[in-house]
């Protein structure tokens, strides 16, 4: 079965590899790429989506620019991780793939209306675009099969002690998504930190001896330096492709139904995903929460995708 998906992202090094995986893996049909401000400004994220699609030869997937700011407040970007361009490391040159004139929300709404079957939304950046679709276009919500996000954590955060970056950028948007009458799956740091691009992974990419393999090594080398400098990681977690892997093969990303609340008020905890793992609150299970990754099968699928490019 091929699942139609829309990938909403903020490229971003791990977003870039998620684009490669989404385009290459036959289990998903990538209908569109939409961008949102997060790792960098939305303008730079769109340029970066264009860059990776140009190098990968992805010319048949529309790229649409989304929200520049969160629902409330100002955007704070993840320049400390992804660099000034948002995709630092490689020398990109001018992208040949253009972006659509349609806005991200308009493209998502149109595809949800037009596609012959429900569409899965894979959101691996702040959730602003998705919240706007749910809030302002309730008539298309039934055409969303499920929403699978990279975001949140059952443990500590990364942007603040208790908030993961994607949720922290727009907690109000996340609250809208997790309150929606929709299947939502959360792939948080607790599972994406199981997807470390360790030296054996880097060696497998180098052994491909292809331009795309070498480009991914360059991206991961920059990403690795950011993670070592900021959080002391010896190998960087490849967050965003984990969310995609949940759609490609759910058996690779084991989940549990849990109540998830989004903290929007806390002075020190705003943006936290409060996961009631022991069901003490009596609240309903409003999300599937990813807990265990089959690392070997994840990396096999990721490297197989990279190997499919020249
Ligand atoms: O916290 C990790 C998430 O924030 C990833 O999606 C990364 O790309 C950044 O957007
Ligand atoms: Ca991202």
Image (cartoon, helix red, strand yellow):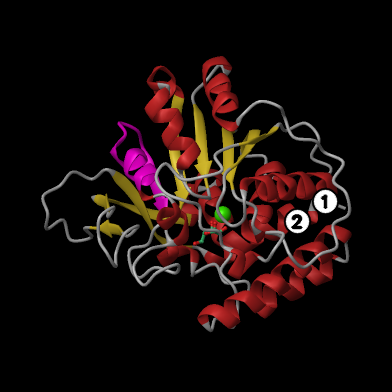
Q: Is residue 266 visible?
A: yes
The residue depicted at 55 percent of the width and 48 percent of the height is: 244
Say if 14 sits above or below 173 in the image: below
180 in magenta: yes
Mark number displayed over residue 117: none
The residue depicted at 46 percent of the width and 36 percent of the height is: 130
Disc 1 is placed on an element classified as loop
Which residue position is annotated with label 1? 309
Disc 2 is placed on an element classified as helix
Q: Is residue 151 visible?
A: no
The residue depicted at 76 percent of the width and 75 percent of the height is: 203
Q: Nearer the viewer, residue 161 or 300?
A: 161
169 in magenta: no
Q: Which residues are magenta?
A: 172-186
Residue reaching furthest to the front: 74
User: Residue 215 in the image: x percent, y percent?
Assistant: 81, 63
In which quarter of the view is residue 239 placed?
bottom right
Which residue position is annotated with label 2? 306
User: Residue 167 in the image: x percent, y percent?
Assistant: 41, 54
Residues marked 1 and 2 touching at CB (< 8 Å)? yes
Say if 240 sits above or below 191 in the image: above
């Amino acid at each position: 079965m091929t699942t139609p998906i829309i990938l909403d992202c903020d490229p971003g090094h791990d977003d870039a590899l998620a684009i490669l995986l989404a385009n290459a893996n036959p289990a998903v049909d990538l209908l569109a790429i939409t961008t949102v401000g997060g790792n960098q400004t939305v303008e730079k994220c769109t340029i970066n989506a264009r860059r990776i699609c140009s190098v990968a030869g992805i010319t048949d997937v529309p790229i649409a620019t989304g929200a520049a700011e969160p629902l409330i407040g100002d955007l704070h970007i993840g320049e400390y991780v992804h660099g000034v361009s948002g995709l630092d490391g490689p020398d990109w040159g001018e992208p040949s793939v253009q972006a659509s004139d349609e806005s991200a929300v308009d493209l998502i709404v149109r595809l949800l209306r037009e596609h012959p079957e429900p569409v899965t939304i894979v959101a691996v950046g702040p959730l602003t675009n998705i919240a706007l679709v749910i809030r302002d276009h309730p008539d298309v919500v039934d055409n969303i099969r499920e929403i699978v996000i990279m975001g949140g954590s059952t443990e500590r955060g990364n942007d603040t002690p208790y908030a993961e970056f994607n949720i922290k950028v727009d907690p109000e948007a996340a609250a809208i998504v997790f309150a929606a009458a929709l299947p939502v799956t959360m792939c948080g740091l607790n599972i994406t930190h199981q997807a470390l691009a360790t030296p054996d992974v880097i060696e497998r990419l180098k052994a491909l001896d292809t331009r795309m393999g070498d480009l991914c090594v360059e991206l991961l080398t920059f990403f690795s330096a950011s993670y070592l400098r900021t959080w002391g990681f010896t190998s960087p977690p490849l967050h965003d492709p984990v969310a995609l892997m949940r759609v490609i093969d759910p058996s690779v990303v084991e989940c549990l139904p849990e109540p998830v609340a989004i903290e929007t008020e806390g002075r020190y905890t705003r943006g936290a995903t409060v996961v009631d793992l022991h069901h003490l609150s009596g609240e309903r299970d409003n999300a599937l929460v990813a807990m265990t990754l089959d690392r070997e099968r994840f990396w096999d699928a990721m490297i197989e995708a990279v190997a499919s490019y020249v």
